[in-house]
Image (tube, rainbow, N blue to C red):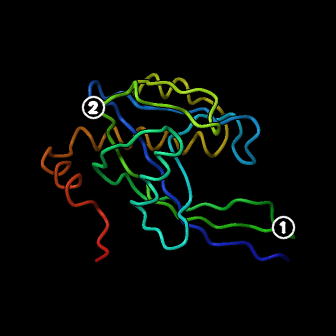
Amino acid sequence: MTIGYFQCGIAALIRSAADGRYLLLQRVESKDYAAGVWECVTGRLEQGEGFEQALHREVAEEIGTSVRLQCMLGTTHFHRGTPPGQAFNESLGVVYGCVLDNPDAVVRSSEHKKHRWVNASEALALLTADDPSTGWMRTIIARSETLWRHLPPPWAIFAERLGLETDA
């Protein structure tokens, strides 16, 4: 059996500062995993990179702009590959809630073929495919909606100024 890799990643669920709509991106059909599904910004950490550094790099690479980090929505743990006998990669990720001040600033990379700004109910109506990635996105949207109803505004200001990582 071939040994896979342990990887770390990030996800950035991005909301519009103006109206709270979410940015969803549709993956191109040529992607090796979850081709054609709707997602938020996602990516892997590079060696020596922190989670928040990776978040800002991936956002810049995938949508050509920057965001303000405001909360952590949770963690994720999953496997990619087809066992047995093939590399089976294990990934651990941190999911962040972010805000974009100018939704018109989005410039999609070649990783995605479409993007849409949608409210939570529109997102859930769009996320109907029966695959693990789509189910995960539905959960993240629902979690975000609950969190934003209860998150005190000073917390978002704290997170923007100091970040959420505790590394020195």
Quick one: quadrant of the N terminus? bottom right
Residue 20 on image: x %, y %: 31, 29
Residue 26 on image: x %, y %: 61, 32
Residue 134 on image: x %, y %: 59, 39
Secondary element at image label 2? loop
Residue assigned mark 1 = 86
Q: Residue at x 27, y 31 (%)?
A: 17
Q: Residue at x 84, y 68 (%)?
A: 84
Secondary element at image label 1? loop
Spatial CA span between label 2 and label 1: 44 Å
Say which label, 2 or 1, has the lower sequence index.
2
Relative height, residue 125 to residue 2 (above, below): above
Residue assigned mark 2 = 17
Residue 48 on image: x %, y %: 49, 73
Identity, as a three-letter code, of the amino acid under mark 2: Ala
- State the mark number for residue 62: none
Name the quadrant containing residue 88: bottom right
> In the shown orientation, is residue 148 left or right of residue 22?
left
> In the shown orientation, is residue 153 left or right of residue 6?
left
Mark 2 residue crowding within 10 angstroms, few (<14) / some (14–19) / many (20+):
some
Name the quadrant containing residue 18: top left
Q: Which of 144 and 50 is in front in this view?
A: 50
